[in-house]
Amino acid sequence: MQQILQHLVNIFQSYGILGLIVLAFAESSFFPIPPDVVLIPMCIMDKNMSLIYALSTTLSSVAGGVFGYYIGKRFGKPILKKLFKEDKIDKVGYYFDKYGGWSIVIAGFTPIPYKIFTIAAGVFNVNFITFVTASLIGRGMRFFLEGILIFYMGDSAKYFITNYFEYITIGVALLLIVFYGLFRYLKKKNLLKLNFAVYKNKIYSKLNYFHKKYRIVDQTAFYVYTSIVLSFFSLFVFLELTEDNFIHKDYSLDIYIIQLVLSIRNNVLTKIFKGITVLGNYEWIIAFTVLVMTLMIRNNRKKFSAFFGLNITLVWLFNELLKVLFKRPRPDLIYRLVDARGYSYPSGHAMISLTFALILVYYLNERDFKYNSIKFAVIILALIIGISRIYLGVHYFTDVLAGWSVAIIYSTTSILIYKNVLSKERE
């Protein structure tokens, strides 16, 4: 069993930050291997990236915790009994009764299995905001402490973390429990004169005043921050893929996906994906673009119609430029089920289709389009078009992933420019 776990750790390490993100997400809800075993070696290999790795691990771990929370919410206590022993479930229930949702801080920071608390939080109906906040604190404290130690101590931090880190986390957790107990005792004896209701009302009134004062620009701010976060993450993924493919010559992920695809190919799937991939061909993209632009013009959105058409054209040209720069050949002919010409990286079908979908969904949101299922379907279709290229053997997995990453960077940046510059003049 130990050899199997070590082999899994090696697989996650081989994929760098992507492996770290996947491991951190999975560990928070169902996987037995903690992300520390990948985070620590990565930080030691490049200590300047330690805080970025810590941030990625924290956010991914909390996202996985949210997934675990909804597993517990959906399936209830029976799922806990299938995954964990009865005594552990009772102990978690005791912690929730005594410390509330904030016991998750302790679970997130210490060696206590975090996933049992994430699933149990959903089972015991812990307040969702409390759960997320406590998870961010607990997971952030743990992973950032590791990252900061390595950032300042370098290689010597490995010995310190291996031998003393768990004792530190337990010590800090005990201090938190002592302070929590002291706080409750003082409050019970009326020795702590804090009126939280008054403070809460004051904070709320100030936030409400701020919202009303700046309500004109708050939506713009939302697009600004969302665009920055999405663009940063997507750029990081694109650079990581590019580094693996063209500097380290690491094709292990692509080889694995090709083998997986070959094992599931059948006549039904082939017909489905052949039909879907056609929707990303240039003639169909042109037809869809013209149709959408026409509908926009009929709805008196001439400026956005021009913006939409311009961006589909530019992202197409940008994709061709990137292909010429990287000059990656397509997979061997023996893997292909359809004809394809030109270079492979990044996938044009994936990149252009997702850009098309993201800008169209933004437009629908601006028009207060109420049918979210249609907007969701547009995004899913764009993603399936990218997946079809992998299945049909004309693109590697990393080609498609890179195409999606560039599409997010391009579309969010373009929307941000439109939101803050072009849309200032009324149509």
Image: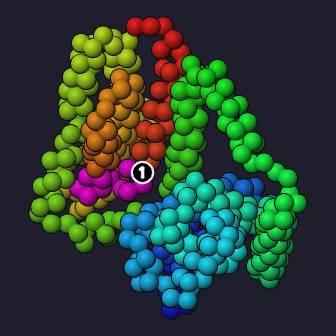
**Disc 1: which residue:** 401
Quadrant for residue 231, please give it.
top right
Q: Position of residue 210 (x, y in %)?
A: 67, 26
Q: Is residue 36 magenta?
A: no
Q: Position of residue 224 (x, y in %)?
A: 57, 30
Q: Position of residue 340 (x, y in %)?
A: 24, 46
Q: Does 298 sit above or below residue 316?
A: above
Please state which amino acid type lies under the numbered disc 1. Answer: Leu
Q: Residue at x 68, y 32 (%)?
A: 205
Quadrant for residue 170, please give it.
bottom right
Closest to the observer, 119 or 36: 119
Q: Report the coloring of the rendering.
A: rainbow
Closest to the observer, 160 or 115: 115
On the rendered structure, is 218 left or right of 256? right
**Part of the protein shown in magenta:** 386-400
Q: Does 78 sit above or below residue 275?
A: below
Q: Residue at x 54, y 56 (%)?
A: 128
Q: Residue at x 40, y 24 (%)?
A: 366
Q: Does 279 sit above or below residue 107?
A: above
> Which structural element holds mark 1?
helix
Determine the main secondary structure of the stretch shown in magenta: helix
Q: Residue furthest front?
A: 190
Q: Residue at x 51, y 72 (%)?
A: 120
Q: Residues within 10 Å of mark 1 (few under 14, many from 20)?
A: many
Closest to the observer, 417 or 275: 417
- Whether residue 29 is visible here, answered yes or no, is no
On the rendered structure, is 120 left or right of 395? right
